[in-house]
Amino acid sequence: MGSQQQHHDQFESQRDHHASEAGLVQGLRKDDLELEALDPKKKTKYEEEEEEEEEKENLGLEEEFSVERIFEKLTVPSWKEQLTVRAFFISFVLSVLFSVIVMKLNLTVGIIPSLNVSAGLLGFFFVRTWTKFLDRYGLLKQPFTRQENTVIQTCVVASSGIAFSGGFGSYLFGMSARIAQQSTDHSTSDIKDPGLLWFIGFLFVVSFLGLFSVVPIRKIMIIDFKLTYPSGTATAHLINSFHTPQGAKLAKKQVKELGKFFSFSFLWGFFQWFYTAGDDCGFVSFPTLGLKAYQNKFFFDFSATYVGVGMICPYIVNISVLLGGILSWGLMWPLIENRSGDWYSKELKPTSMNGLQGYKVFIAIAMILGDGLYNFLKVLSRTLIALQSQLRAKDVNNILPIEDQVSPAVTSALSYDDQRRTQLFLKDQIPAWFAVGGYVAIAAVSIATVPHIFPQLKWYYILVIYLFAPTLAFCNAYGCGLTDWSLASTYGKVAIFMIGAWAGSAHGGVLAGLAACGVMMNIVSTASDLTQDFKTGYLTLASPRSMFVSQVIGTAMGCVISPCVFWLFYKAFTDLGTPTSAYPAPFAVVYRNMAILGVEGFKSLPKHCLLLCAVFFGAAILINVIKDCIGKKRARFVPLPMAMAIPFYLGSYFAIDMCIGSLIVFLWERVNKAKADAFVPAVASGLICGDGIWTLPASILALAGVKPPICMRFLSRAENDRVTKLLTG
């Protein structure tokens, strides 16, 4: 990715597989530094045994742990040579693929797994195939390098990341009349229906500021503070391994597995389509656990996408989602439904926010806010404490590296890898005046333009956001480097409440809050993504300039591709955004009701709902406190409140699919852990990509008016007898 990526984006960044690989890299680096720092007295002990042999072993260890010695004889291409036409062509193709996948997940469950590995792997496969073909006929002019691979991966993840941070499943779609009808307000003044052109225009004027805000501090983050950025480090480790002979061989096998499960997933989606000629038809409505369980959203829906997501997500995420489903749909909602007539009117529609639906949405919001507030304060405090200790430990002004050189005192303490990486990282500078000038220019355009798109969001609201944005972008990027958590959606929720309350209900506070969420979320999200990219580029010797240009081009692609993909979904599926749809867009309702809550207060809540919200808000904080107090070994068994909140509104059907994915991984690891570690990401990516890509032809068929020929529906025995009698007269 860089990183492509926490409220619902918290799960995008909870990458245990990547983090373990990052830990391996860090472990190797630690061992390497320990070898260099051996006490002289201890050395003499080894010398007594056999000095020459010990030196050879040490040399061998250094060779083994030094990544850059493997690539020592290869010339590092200039930053312009890293930006090739073929790289951006492949990036465009993969961006469309991944944007469809992210959009589908965004409009269904809101859990976005890391697609870094898939982007790096598929980028490697396509370009390597391309270069081999050209080389066979003597037409190859430029070999494929790990730097070019990094450029592709960065561009793809930057582009597909807009499908998430663009708010198509949250704040932007939450402005529409379709979502307003499901929320607690029905005001026509706070509505703005989707439009392709204004989507593209809005994203272009708000998506680039975050890139310019962190450019001036890249050296502090990567070289001086040596922040880990686990996902960026893990991605770099994978890309480096792809370009070694053994890594290339493994990558070829991984791509083969990905292709196999991609084909299976695509064909399975195609097969299921034939049986979905009406509502509640097909395998997605299969009552696998019984009809009563099906009514309460407990069933396996045969989705290859959710099984693949479950294989990538950590066990605790999947278990937490299932526990949340059991707590809500298995216990709470049936009990509250029994109170109908007392707590709320029996005459209300099932979708009314004054009835059961209100409890589902607002209790989920309470858990999301409780978890978000706790993690926001935790990460922010850790960021400030770590930053303060680092600033106290050394005078930053004296150790900041200047262009093309590093302090001799620092250089002497670096390993060979770090020396080489630091030298090349400092070689291609991005001038500070360029970053500051770019930020000011884009901010001015944005302040002038956005109020024309959203008249409720006054220019001075945006000016205040942009004055604070660089500081918040720094905090998010720094916190992401420490914890691998991007809190972009949390900063967005803060903007919803602050700007919404400032504007007030009489001046379109709901729409102003949602639009402010988009402005803030895009800045802090792209800032953390770019610093992840800088870390990846640092470890693969990709130039900071090529990383920046790749991120800019990827973001520009995303500003066009993502709205077009959403528009395809919106036009093809006329019920998109409704609770009964295959694409319910659950977070659009959640974000809109957050905005209403910020503007109108608690008066819109059903009876006793505020008390229940307070209980679950406190419970989310308490669970996090317990998780942080009992130590890492025990904490991995404590559920995540954010994950538990997601099925409160949607149900548990996807949780069962994800848990089956976890079960597959668990059994595979018991049989052959090494093979599972190597191939689980590829198999999961194949399942996600194949099912995701089937959405494209399915959407085209829907737009063309082609309907499936069969409806496979499941009835109880009594209902079946009545239908049979009716059909037979």
Image: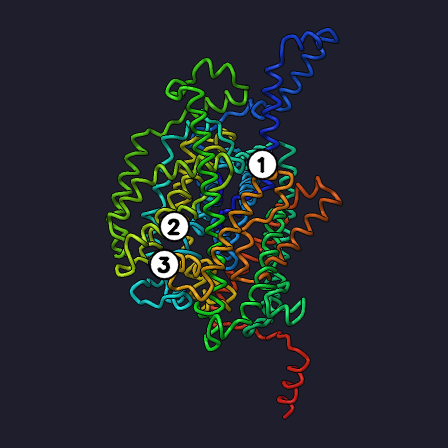
Q: Is residue 125 visible?
A: no
Count residues near mark 3 (Cα–Cα under 10 Å), then give few for <14, some for 14-19, many for 20+: few
Q: Is residue 312 above or below residue 268?
A: above
Residue 559 badge:
2
Q: In the image, residue 220 lies at what x, y percent?
A: 42, 27
Q: Are marks 3 and 2 in contact (CB under 8 Å)?
A: no
Q: CA distance from mark 2 to mark 1?
A: 28 Å
Residue 663 in percent (x, y) is at 69, 52
Q: Give whichever of 601, 455 is nearer the camera.
A: 601
Q: Residues within 10 Å of mark 1 (few under 14, many from 20)?
A: many
**Which disc, if any, is residue 140?**
none
Question: Badge 2, how many Cα within 10 Å: few under 14, some, many 20+?
Answer: many
The spot of residue 367 in percent (x, y) is 50, 53
Helix, strand or loop at disc 1? Answer: helix
Figure check: 284 above or below 205: below
Q: Secondary structure at mark 2?
A: helix
Q: Residue at x 41, y 42 (%)?
A: 526
Q: 421 above or below 117?
A: above
Q: Is residue 403 above or below residue 703?
A: above
State the mark number for residue 601.
3
The residue that mark 1 highlights is 238
Q: Residue at x 43, y 15 (%)?
A: 407
